[in-house]
Amino acid sequence: MSVDLSRFQSAFFEESAEHVATMEEGLLQLEQRPGDLDLLNRIFRAAHSIKGNAGMFGFAAVGEFTHKMENLLDALRTGTRAVTKPLIDLLLEAADGLKRLLEAARTQAEPDEAVIGPLLGRLQACAAGAGGGEPAPAHPPVAPPPSAETRRRYRIAWRPSKSVFQRGVHPAGMLRELQEMGEVTPPVAWEAIPPLEVLENEDSPRVWTLTLATDRPRHEIDDVFLFVAEDSELTIEEVEDEVEAQVKVENGFPSTSTLTSTSASGLASTSASGKPLGEILVEEGVISPDVLRQALAQQKRLGEILVEQKAATPQQIARALDKQHQLERAAPKKVETASIRVDTEKIDKLINLVGELVITQSMLSDLGAHFQISQMPVLLERLAQLERNTREIQERVMAVRMLPIGTAFNRFPRLIRDLSAKNGKQIQLVMSGEDTELDKTVIESIGDPLTHLVRNAADHGLERPEERAATGKREQGTVTLNAFHEGGSICITVQDDGRGLNRDRILAKALQQGLVNETDKLTDDQIWPLIFRPGFSTAETVTDVSGRGVGMDVVKRNIEALGGTISIKTEAGRGTTFTLTLPLTLAIIDGLTLRVGTETYIVPLLSVVESIQPRAGAVQSVAGRGEVVNVRNLYHPVLRLGDIFGLAPEITDPAQAILVILESEGERVAVMVDELLGQQQVVIKSLEQNFRKVEGLSGATILGDGTVALILDVRGLIGLARHGEPVGA
Amino acid sequence: MGKQVLIVDDSVTMRQMVSFTLSSAGFEVVEAGDGQEAVGKLNAGAKPHLVITDLNMPRMDGISLIKAVRAMPAFKFTPVLMLTTESDDGKKREGQAAGATGWVVKPFNPEQMLKVIAKVLPA
């Protein structure tokens, strides 16, 4: 029977990814607590597990690499080597290398020798002298070649010591194995062998002497006694032939493959992600860092600019681009797992609830079979029960897809460490609310936007230590990440205690880019969101990771694609806080139901500021700008939903209608409707999938009475209001 | 055969693989993630005919588990196999001294594991 273990490969990769994360986390903590043996053991075990499992699937490269890491970690935990920063740096680099190797194994690609080779060499060099010879890398046991098939006779004398019995080894087992190999004389008296309890307490040790005639190779006979050889007296002699020396064979030690340790050649990989083109060109000596800085500041494609300036030839650029692609391809891609770990408790609760649902359903069906109008109260009661069951199940099922946000946060300690070193700043990272749960898809999608915000805080928000000291701040800057539930959403804040956004510079840049006019009177709250416009950046120096102005608009778009919002609070000299608000799940939103004429619309509750019934004359027409309404001394544009969607509203006099004030990106609009119908949870159905994309709408849903209600896209509406065009019905 | 085996390993992947191998051969499998969990299961009524345990585990490691199992009268003579790596010579000896019956070297192929099990489990 052959057992195929390849189906467990994806489990291996998932588990190994977790182990690598454990190692990274542990190494970062180890820097603060170098003497923590528990921590060292945890890191060691993670590497050990990966190694043990890798061998099961034949992933030799992963196994060899982890073996080297294990050696170094072992040296650390036995105290043979001390925990130092360079050592931690090396191990962190090694963890990156391991990620690459795992990815290569997963995609059946070739590992990048240029990166792995040097790392192996450095790991080995570091652990060298840490005692003991190099044990062989993992190989399945190799048996020596079988000897020729001739029948031989062996005299076997076996005297087991008590400990053999105490370890649960029953002599009958050994004897049976021998019997299966050939002829045993004298024949074994099975009944005469007492159980282990008795054998253990016998005073005089037993000896089994027998002759075995077999054509099996010698090592197989030795193998029979494999587990008892150490605590028994054992002789196996071939008789009527020369006496063979007893060869103790456990596992063969095949020759180690030689590992080429190529010189680092100055291209030591720092982070595993793709290297910026400019860095490669500077490293290769094609251009100088100054030229790079100048070129980047112009924000055209670097390669084009350099060729224009004759600072590099097209061929050099092409070569460097090739190299960038190579590195990118080799870099570990974000792993989108198609499976999810769920607490069995969550599943158990769900199973219970489904059980209750079944009961309710059968009670209803019972009632329906012989329904009489006098039973109406009972019917209503059971329907209420049904509603409770359904709602609970809905909540529990959503909870199944939820994971703690800590998994998205755990990349940041490493990132902050690297960024502090790179920028010469001292940065402290504080995280809280890691247990806050949100939908798995949302977690996977906010990783990049959050990373961008954290990078911004570290690169541009926080000042260098000297600057901070000069203004009386602590030299060490703090980036704070927090996550918490509020209402039906989750809020994530990224806060820094740095220099805050610069109002004047943003305004100047916005004017320069034509985003605002000189005459516009803008409140602070309207100025900050300008940084989310595409191409906008006021960074004085463009670093290779941020400041190019392509980040913030993508961040905002990503957040809004998830149905969330992003807002800014900032204070000059004190710091900046970005707040992301995300729905707990993508498929369901809390909505406000509105009526215009005979049509029902839904607007996301998150976007609703308030709803009012304006006083007579509060809504006025402004030449060239349509209608506006004054709400607490702020003028909001008014949109008549009827006009936009080509409907005939019931009420045309604003004083009789309802105005719902909606907000998106710091801009507000008042939407005029006939009636507010209520608030409810709404399951979003995609328009694109079922019809086509429509401006001003973000989806549709089916109401309780079976009719279709369209869900308004607030951002789109505001855009429409500006252009003043109606949408086709 | 219908015998029960207790597999103790902190690696989910390893537990899944051993479980699959054993159940394909007709064994009933009980799993535990570390030594402490294993002892808990034994105290709660599990009656394995064989215990297979990894050595490197958090909370209670393999060697401690072997000692604990041997100290329980019901399992004094139950065969216990260690999952070791080839360089673990010292550990093999330590395990034997603690009372382990034998060992299976990682990585193993399923047939090898089943052979070793047949060796230590009286039919």
Image: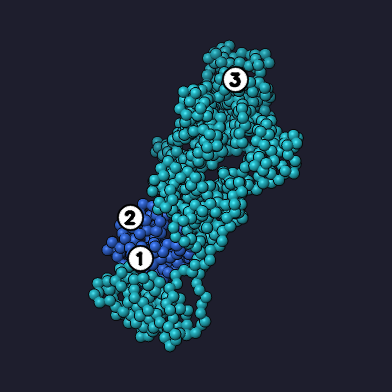
Chain colours: A cyan, B blue
Q: Is residue A231 above or below residue A676?
A: below
Q: Is residue A384 visible?
A: yes
Q: Residue flagged by tag 2: what amino acid is it?
A: Gly
Q: Residue at x 58, y 16 (%)?
A: A635
Please count the marks in the image: 3
Q: Separation of disc 1 and disc 3 at Cα?
A: 76 Å
Residue B67 horizontal side relative to residue A675, left or right: left
> Which mark is drawn over residue B96?
1
Q: Do the residues at pointers 2 and 3 share their chain?
A: no
Q: Which one is nearer the viewer's eye here, A560 or A510?
A: A510
- The Cα atoms of the two marked residues, 2 and 3, are separated by 66 Å
Q: Residue at x 56, y 46 (%)?
A: A336
- Residue at image mark 3: A504
Which chain hosts label 1? B
Which three-letter amino acid code belongs to the residue tagged 1?
Answer: Gln
Q: Chain of mark 3?
A: A
| Amino acid type of the residue that numbered disc 3 sits on in the rendered structure | Asp
State which tag comes first along the sequence, 2 or 1. 2
Q: Quadrant of residue A229?
A: bottom left
**Percent position (x, y) of residue A417?**
50, 38
- At x 39% / y 83%, what residue is drawn? A155
Residue at the extreme top: A617
Residue A130: horizontal and vertical position, in percent?
45, 55
Q: Quadrant of residue A709?
A: top right
* Residue A585, disc: none
Image quarter for residue A184? bottom left
Q: Indicate the position of residue A458 as horizontal and vertical percent values.
A: 53, 33
Quadrant of the image containing the C terminus of chain A: top right
Q: Nearest the camera: A539 or A605?
A: A539
Reading the image, the residue beneath label 2 is B40
